[in-house]
Image (cartoon, rainbow, N blue to C red):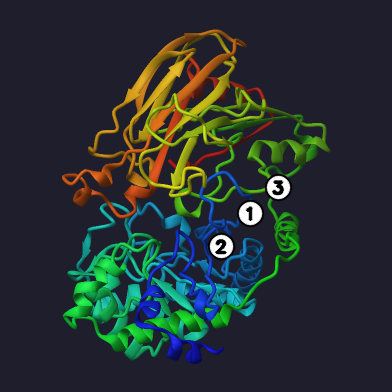
Amino acid sequence: MSAPEILAALSLDEKLSLLAGGSQWRTAAIDRLGVPTLKVSDGSSGARGEIFGENVPAAFLPCGVSLGATWDVELMQEIGQLLADECKSKSASVSLAPTMCIHRHPLGGRNFESFSEDPFFTGKLAAAHIRGLQSRGVGATPKHFVANDQETKRFKVNAHIDPRALREVYLLPFQMAVREADPWCMMTTYNKVNGHHCDASKELLTDIARDEWEWDGVFMSDWGGTTSTVDSINHGLDLEMPGPSMWRSMEALEKPLRDGAINMHRVDDSARRVLALLEKTGRHERPAPQGCMFRDHASEEQQGRTAPAAEEESISTLAVVGPNAKRVVAGGGGSSYIKAPSWTSVHDSIEREFAQYGTKVRFHEGSKLNRYLPTPSPVIISNPDTGNPGACIDWHLSHDLSTETVAKTHADDLYFMSFGDVPKEVGRPVDFSFRVRAILKPLTTGTHHLSLASIGPAKLFVDNEKILHQSGAFEERSTLFFTYGSGELRASLFMEAGREYRIRVDCLSHDRQLDAAIAPLMEPMEEKFQGFRLGYEEWGQTDLPAEAAQLAEGCDAAIVVVGRDKE
C-alpha cells in the first residue's frame, strides 16, 4: 500500500500514534496495516545507533567546526554519503544531522558540532551534507530550528530576536538547506524565540517553513523538547520524540479531542508526512563497512602537510608536551559522542611518524587540564570478572542490592550514563539499582584523590570501606550528565603502588518523577537518566610546567599539544 492509501485506512487512534515516538529512537508501528517502525540515529559525528555511550563502535567523523574549516562542499557531500552507509549499518533510516546552529557566543557549549558563524557558509555546507545523505536513501534532519545557540538554560531561555536578524542570521541556513537539498526532516529546538517555544511556534513552523518555503518534510522535536499537546499539533510539529509520549498519549489527547481543540486537518497532515518519510527511506540491508574515504582524505592531507620541522632527519630528540598529547580528545562529547573502532593519540601518531628517522620522542603532560578528576586510565582499572579494562555492572530489580542480580553489563569507562537504555531484564525507569565493581591498581604510592558524581543516590566503597556518599537530592546541578547530575565530591586516600584495590559504587535509580513536589521542576528527559562518574588522580607535588620546559630545552624540537576536552 502507498502512503496515501495507508492514511485513508487509518483509524483516528492509529493516526495519532504516528505523531509520537514508539520508543527512544523509533517511531510507532501499526501492525494492522504493516506500517513498520523507523529508526533514527544521532549523526553529527557519526551514526551511533540506539545505544548511548561506550557500547557499539562506529566511524567517528571530524566535528562540524573541523569540517567547516575544509571549505569543501564536495567533501561534505561525500561525508553525507558515508554517514548514510553508517546509518544503514545500524539499521537506522534517518540521521539526526547536520547540526547547523550559528556560532554567536564563545561559550556556546555545542559550537564544535556546527560549521561556522556565517549563515551563508553554514547553509552551503549543510545542503551538501543533506544531499549526500539522502542520495543513499537515508533522511537528513538539520537541527536545531531555530536559534539554539547557547546551552545555558537551554530548555527555558527566551531568545528575543528582531525580524531582520532572525531571517538573515538564524533562518537563512535552514532556508538554503530547504531550497538546495529538501531535507526529509528538521528538528526543533528546546528554547523559545520571541516568547514562543519553537516546537509550538506558528510563525516558525507554519507561516515560514510551510507557507513561505513550501517545505513538506517532518518536523520532529528535540528529545523531550515537546512543550504542549494542542499548540504543538495545531502549529505544525509532526512528531514528538522520544517515546513513550508525554504530550500525545491517549490520556493527554482525550480532553482536547473531545473539546474540539485539535485541528483534525493538522493530524492528517502530520500522519501523512510521517508515512511519506517511511516511504522515502524504505528498508535497508546491512552493507559492508566503509572506511576507504577516511583513509583517502587522511592520505591527501598527509601529502600536503607542513612538517613539524623543516628536516625531520635532523631531529634526534623531540619533546611532546601537553595533557591531551596522550589522551584521545575527539569531539566535544554529549549527543555527538561516538565510540570509534580504534583511537590514535597525538603522541602515538608522532612517535610512529618519527620512528623512521630514529628520533627519540619524550613526553611530559606539562599541566593539568581537568575540571573534574579524570576517570581512571584503562591501564589501572579492570573488570574483576573478566580482567578487561573497565568495570562490571550488576543490575537489580529494586533498591535492595542484596537481591538477585538480574543482568550483568560491562562499562569501558567509569563515566557511565544510561539514557533510558537499561538491560531488558530491568525494563523500567524506576525502582532499580546497579552495583559497579572494578579493580584499581595505582601506579605510585601516596595520598591519592578519588571523586564521585551521580544522578541519584550513590556510594563509593574502597575495599568495602565507604569513602563518598552522594545523597541524590534534587538540587542545583553540575555540567555533568547533560546537566542532570550532581556536583563532584572528593576524598583522599593513601594507596600503594601495584596493590589491587576493590572499587565498588552502589547506585539507586533517582525516581524523582514519583515525587509530586519535584516532578514539575524536572527538566525534559530527566526521568530517563541514570549514571555515575568515578574520578581518580594520583598524588604529586611537582611543578609540571617547569618540568616540561626543562624537558623541551634538552630536545632538538618540541611539539606542544594545546586545547581543552569534553568537560
Amino acid on which the number 2 mark rests in the picture: Leu
Q: Residues within 10 Å of mark 1 (few under 14, many from 20)?
A: many
For discs 3 and 2, the disc positioned in front in the rendered view:
2
- Is there CB contact under 8 Å for labels 2 and 1? no
> Where is 154 relative to 385, above or below?
below
- Is there CB contact under 8 Å for labels 3 and 2? no
Q: Residue at x 50, y 67 (%)?
A: 97
For discs 2 and 1, the disc positioned in front in the rendered view:
1
Q: Regarding mark 1 in the picture, which secondary structure is present there? A: loop
Residue 79 placement: quadrant: bottom right
**Mark 3 vs mark 2: which is more N-terminal?**
2
The residue wearing badge 2 is 67
Amino acid on which the number 3 mark rests in the picture: Ala
Amino acid on which the number 1 mark rests in the picture: Ala
The residue wearing badge 1 is 58
Residue 488 placement: quadrant: top left
The answer to whether 278 appears left or right of 22 in the picture is: right
Q: Residues within 10 Å of mark 2 (few under 14, many from 20)?
A: many
The answer to whether 236 appears left or right of 427 in the picture is: left
Q: Nearer the viewer, residue 83 or 254?
A: 254
Q: Regarding mark 2 in the picture, which secondary structure is present there? A: helix
